[in-house]
Image (tube, helix red, strand yellow):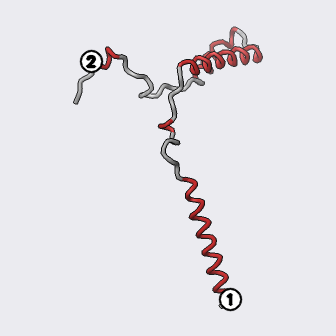
Amino acid sequence: MRLHKTLATGLMVMSMGAMSLSSYAQATPGEGPQDRPAISAEKMAKFEKEKARREAELHDRLKITAAQEDAWKTYLKSEQFPPKPGDRRLQKDERTKLTTP
């Protein structure tokens, strides 16, 4: 009887612990990636400037020769993120040309 009581108590404690841990996994409204503000043009320009500086520094540290320039440019091109299809917003004149359903 004592073993049965101990097992039941242990199972109850483990199940309560599992239920409390699952509550941490749920996101509250306003915390998802869709709720984050868009990156401003100022921050994007700062990012691009810093990226160009790092690329130039790496180019100098690697001592890229003229014969290696094509490979270097290919490498830099491969490091670019492809644009997402929905990233570009339509300008006003482009929106007026669209047909509505």
Q: Amino acid at mark 2?
A: Lys
Image x and y of residue 23, in percent = 55, 57
Q: 46 above or below 7?
A: above
Q: Residue furthest top?
A: 66
Question: What residue sits 22% from the left and 30% below the top?
Answer: 101
Specify the quadrant of the image occupied by residue 51: top right
Image x and y of residue 42, in percent = 57, 18
Q: 64 above or below 20?
A: above
Q: CA distance from mark 2 to mark 1?
A: 79 Å
Question: What residue sits 69% from the left and 8% below the top?
Answer: 66
Q: 25 above or below 60?
A: below
Question: What residue sits 57% from the left and 23% below the top?
Answer: 80
Q: Left or right? Give the position of 33 relative to 96.
A: right
Image x and y of residue 99, in percent = 24, 24
Give SS at disc 2.
Answer: helix
Kindly identify which residue carries mark 2: 97
Q: Amino acid at mark 1?
A: Arg
Kindly identify which residue carries mark 1: 2
Give SS at disc 1.
Answer: helix
Within 10 Å of disc 2 (Cα), the crowding (few <14, some 14-19, many 20+) is few
Q: Residue furthest bottom?
A: 1
